[in-house]
Amino acid sequence: MSRTLSTLISASIAALAMLPAVAHLQELPAAAVPASTAALDYRMNERIVQVPAGDGGVTLETTVFQPNGAGPFPLIVINHGKDSGRPSLQPRDRFYHMASAFVKRGYAVMVPMRQGFSKSGGRYRDHGCDMTANGYTQAKDIRSTLDYARQQSWIDAERMVVAGQSYGGLATIALGTENLPGVRGLINFAGGLRDDSDRCAWRSQLVAAFGEYGAKATLPSLWMYGQNDSLFGPELAGRMHASYAQAGGRGRLVEFPSFKRDAHGMLASRDGEKVWLEDTERFLKEIGMPTAVVVDVAAPPSQPRTDFASFDDVDAVPFLSEHGRRAYREYLTKMTPRAFAVSPSGGWTWAEEGEDPEGRALATCSAKSRDPCRLYSVDDYVVWTDGRLEQAEKAAATASTEPVPGATPATAVSEPTTSVGSTTVR
């Protein structure tokens, strides 16, 4: 992934507005509302473990999902890309949608954050334009994750597969040059690393790197790249795969059609499964890995649809200034899944794509607004209920609990005004 451009994973975008008087539209990358703030998903037994990596007590922050029971389960290790900016500020990756699909098929899933990323120990090592070395260095932490997995009684150490997206895809293919007991195949989703500085010809360096990996490859692989990938388009993807295959690597390239605004974010999208699942299942069958759905993962609770207003009725959205209504019109053009939240003081937020847009919208809105925020719409429907009705119900409940003579009255607590500089946050 690009080191110098803004993060190009289009799978999620959030926008924020504060005071109507000074409101402005600000689009933020997904990292603005970190995935790591999400509650652990009990439906898939999500937990975080610390995986030893190398010497010196370094550990890797690793997310684990698995079915109920003691196993042993087949394993997929999914490897993340690199956002622009400091790796230590990159949030914990979960690959939630892909992880869910594999847990349903009876797999355990491990998502390690490599050294220097998120809350993992160690430091990030950058070899500049030496893309071959970059891939090998990142592959070491994947190897450490596999070594840890083999020691776990709940892992079937003879049935493992490794996948990676973007920089994680490059590292996954680099890993394939090693002897990997129990690993049956590799999956490369839009693998590569981009460098927009003037110091090197990164495209040709990537082609050369994949050529070296292909000459030493020991495992079959699946490669998936989209027609509108903003980082590694069809021409470059074809060159990288050809270099790998001509050097002796076994890999099938799938070039899928354009996906939303940018195919590079396909794996993070709820809708991405429609793209990657069929070819991935075919590959898994070829290497003797299970594909049948054997676990029933309960669907996450959904927001109930209401009849408050039509989804595209901009004037019906409560509390918004004209600027906020312009923002809602823009929200109507955003990708699903999406969510729009408002506060009584006129604040608003939307979140688009990625993991849990509803939770991200509420979290961002609540962090910036004094008043409680609520969801107004989700995807293509309205979830808002008339606040006046709720107030009436609350008043009725209060009236039904009149103080008993002689009882101590409840204490009213007034909410203080919170200020940022000289601007009141509403």
Image (cartoon, rainbow, N blue to C red):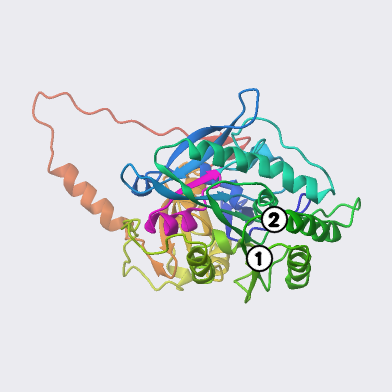
The mark nearer the N terminus, 1 or 2, is: 2
Residue 217's tag is 2
Which residue is more in the foreground, 157 or 188? Answer: 157
- Nearest to viewer (mark 1 / mark 2): 2
Q: Residues within 10 Å of mark 2 (few under 14, many from 20)?
A: many
**311 shown above or below 200:** below
- Numbered range of the magenta stretch: 92-111
The residues bearing labels 1 and 2 have C-alpha atoms spaced at a distance of: 10 Å
Q: Quadrant of residue 166?
A: bottom right
Q: Are marks 1 and 2 in contact (CB under 8 Å)?
A: yes
State the residue lying farthest toward the right: 199
**x and y percent of residue 257 in the render?**
62, 77
**x and y percent of residue 202 in the render?**
84, 56
Report the residue at 49% width, 54% height from top: 355
**x and y percent of residue 148 in the render?**
52, 36
Question: Which secondary structure lies at badge 2?
Answer: loop
Question: Which secondary structure lies at badge 1?
Answer: strand
Q: Quadrant of residue 256?
A: bottom right
Q: Find disc 1 in the rendering and name its residue.
A: 251
Report the residue at 41% width, 45% height from top: 372
Residue 274 is covered by the magenta coloring: no
Residue 21's tag is none
Query: Please, what is the three-letter code of the amino acid marked with disc 2?
Result: Ala
Left or right of 350, for residue 165: right
Query: Please, what is the three-letter code of the amino acid marked with disc 1?
Result: Gly
Left or right of 299, for residue 155: right
Left or right of 407, for residue 351: right
Which residue is more in the foreground, 39 or 246? Answer: 246
Report the residue at 65% width, 63% height from top: 264
Query: Which image quadrant: the N terminus?
Result: bottom right
Residue 110 is covered by the magenta coloring: yes
